[in-house]
Amino acid sequence: MRERRKTKREGASYEALFTSEALSRGLNVLQPFGDFLPYDLLVENQHGQLIRVQVKGTTYKQKGKKNTYHMTVGKSAGYKSKVKLSKEDADVLAAYAAPDKTWYHIPLEHLKSITVHLRPTEKSSAQYEVWKEAWNVYQTKV
């Protein structure tokens, strides 16, 4: 029970960080009531478009790779089972590498698997690096 509370607390802190940053960039942020939806927040851009955002954060470094963070981003598919998020679940994954204070904004159609690797301190052409600090994804409907 204690671990679940810690995870919920961390998730809430990542959502609050996202909200603060999005508001400072002129985006409106709406939070749905309850936590039963596959997305955490809605972002309204200057055109009045709503973008569904799933917020995830990590402090977990991938074993053997000092500059790579690892996270699992899936939805529940039964007892202790997860499947990859899809475009039907959300529009954007906002992934936060907490120790480096770096956001990634990955449109769900570009999510390749349930596992995401982030390399915020490296100049890299790795899979998701093009989405590092890509706040512009909220400016047009994805």
Image (cartoon, grey):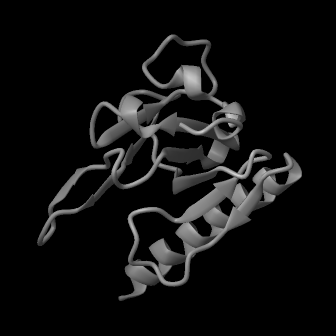
Residue at 60%, 61% in the rendered image:
42
Give x and y (percent) for residue 8. Answer: 49, 76
Give x and y (percent) for residue 102. Answer: 67, 39
Residue at 77%, 59% in the rendered image:
28
Q: Is residue 124 above or below residue 78?
A: above
Judge by depth and name the residue closer to the eye, 78 or 62.
Answer: 78
Residue at 67%, 68% in the rendered image:
30
Does residue 133 appear in this view?
no
**33 sits left or right of 38 in the view:** right
Q: Is residue 46 above or below residue 139?
A: below
Does residue 6 appear in this view?
yes
- Quarter of the rendering occupied by the N terminus: bottom left
**93 sits left or right of 25 in the view:** left
Q: Is residue 18 above or below residue 63?
A: below
**1 sits left or right of 80 in the view:** right
Extreme-bottom residue of the structure: 1
Residue at 40%, 29% in the rendered image:
110
- Count of residue discs: 0
Judge by depth and name the residue closer to the eye, 14 or 1.
Answer: 14
Quadrant in the rendering for residue 114: top left
**112 sits left or right of 68 in the view:** left
Give x and y (percent) for residue 135. Answer: 70, 36
Q: Is residue 58 above or below residue 32?
A: above
